[in-house]
Amino acid sequence: DTAVSQTPKYLVTQMGNDKSIKCEQNLGHDTMYWYKQDSKKFLKIMFSYNNKELIINETVPNRFSPKSPDKAHLNLHINSLELGDSAVYFCASSPLRGLAGGDTDTQYFGPGTRLTVL
Amino acid sequence: QKEVEQNSGPLSVPEGAIASLNCTYSDRGSQSFFWYRQYSGKSPELIMFIYSNGDKEDGRFTAQLNKASQYVSLLIRDSQPSDSATYLCAVKAPGYSSASKIIFGSGTRLSIRP
């Protein structure tokens, strides 16, 4: 009964390559997110989609392009990978649009994808 | 100034004692506050959320919020070795209606010593 799943779990690649990470949630949530956690464990939001619509787009290089084919899926494509892209990337979902406080804003995280760029 | 600040630790607490974790935030308009726990190599998981001033208790955990001081804390009573983890304070940024922009602190590493 997986809630938020990501593939792959580990990704090792060379600088300059293009790679994708996939995320799926079976919780019926409206909103999905991508977060980056760097080597110092700092967790930072990158993007958010609500029912296939891009809502949050933080200051992220345009080499990163999210795509949401439907509200249960959010993928992340990264072009021309750089050493500084090495991190753990977490997908998350939340129940409703962020209208009310509290549990509707709770983030349910996937297991993470550890990306290593050599 | 960071938007959400935490002491990085490590915070070492003897088993059975109370662990106290603190967090301050900069945006006075913030309304929702969260504590997540993250074990090494795992994803963050929610412990508690709070959005009213005062205390909120759930089992051994108590979250405290003081909006006037822009301060959130988490108390863990009867600390167990299984509580050893990094604790992330998180704040929902105001101004978004279709998604929740959650700002995380850098986390406090808690170690419970037997």
Image (cartoon, coloured by chain):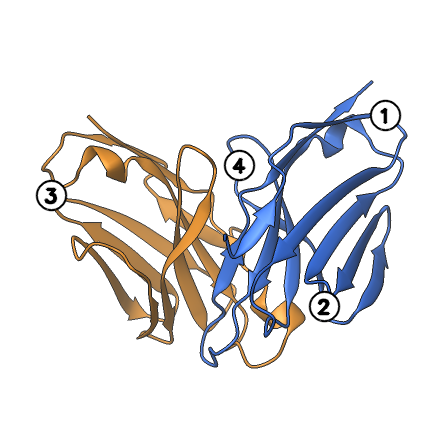
As rendered, which of B72 and A93 lies closer to the eye? B72
Residue A58, disc: none
Q: CA distance from mark 2 to mark 4?
A: 31 Å
Residue B15, disc: 1
Q: Is residue B81 shown left or right of residue A104?
A: right
Question: Both on one chain, marks 2 and 4?
Answer: yes
Mark 3 surroundings: few (<14), some (14-19) or many (≥20) residues within 10 A: few
Q: CA distance from mark 3 to mark 2?
A: 44 Å
| Quarter of the image that includes the C terminus of chain A | top left
Q: Position of residue B67 (x, y in %)?
A: 72, 68
Quick one: which chain is blue? B
Kind of residue at disc 4: Lys
Q: Is residue B46 shown left or right of residue A34?
A: right
Q: Position of residue B11 (x, y in %)?
A: 71, 29
Residue contact at pointers 3 and 4, CB within 8 angstroms: no
Kind of residue at disc 3: Ser
Label 4 element class: loop
Kind of residue at disc 2: Lys
Q: Nearer the viewer, mark 2 or mark 4?
A: 2
- For label 3, the residue is A80
Q: Quadrant location of residue B44?
A: top right
- For label 2, the residue is B67
Residue contact at pointers 1 and 4, CB within 8 angstroms: no
